[in-house]
Amino acid sequence: MSRTTSCLNTLVALLGLAAAGSALAQTPAAPAVQQRAVIDFRTCAKPQYPREELAARHQGIVTLSFQVGADGKVGDSKVAKSSGFPALDESARSALASCQFKPALAADGQPVMAWTAVQYVWTLN
């Protein structure tokens, strides 16, 4: 590869980054959240302990992130911090994703879409 081709490839990559940065700068910022979304555990079933994890006596704490809409419904979810046991993480994520939330509130008191974190503790008696 010639020096000219290498410089041209670098210039094209830099122009692409500049364009992406410009587009991000024009994207309206999400409204400031005054009160975060809160899960209503009464609206969903308790996550089921996976049989193999129960047999192995695995316990742990999983931190989940939920994107909660202004209507209080989950739009997206992910494991933010694993319990160390993927089956426990997925059981908690899938069960709690069906819960209803009290939506986050903007500074003006209006419900807004926002991400919120929920911890679920897996423990044996």
Image (spheres, rainbow, N blue to C red):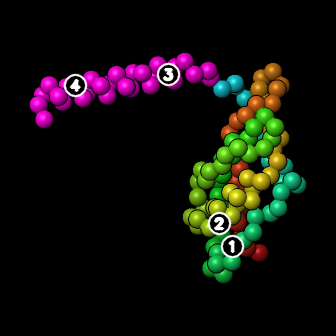
Return the residue at label 1. Answer: 50
104 in relation to 125, above or below? above
Res. 88 mark: 2
Q: Residue furthest right?
A: 42
Is residue 18 within the magenta segment?
yes
Residue 20: mark: none
Q: Is residue 59 above or below residue 120?
A: below
Labelled disc at residue 8: 4
- The mark lying in front, picked from 1 and 4, is 4
Q: Which residue is mark 3?
A: 23
Residue at mark 1 to residue at mark 3: CA–CA distance: 44 Å
Mark closer to the chain start, 4 or 3:
4
3D distance between C-alphas at marks 1 and 4:
55 Å
Residue type at mark 2: give it: Leu
Between 5 and 92, the residue placed more toward the observer is 5
Cα distance, mark 2 to mark 3?
Answer: 39 Å
Span of residues in magenta: 1-29
Q: Classify 21 as above or below 73.
A: above
Mark 1: few/some/many CA within 10 Å (<14, 14-19, 20+): some
- Quote the CA–CA distance across marks 4 and 3: 23 Å
Magenta span: helix, strand or loop, mainly?
helix
Q: Amino acid at mark 3?
A: Ala
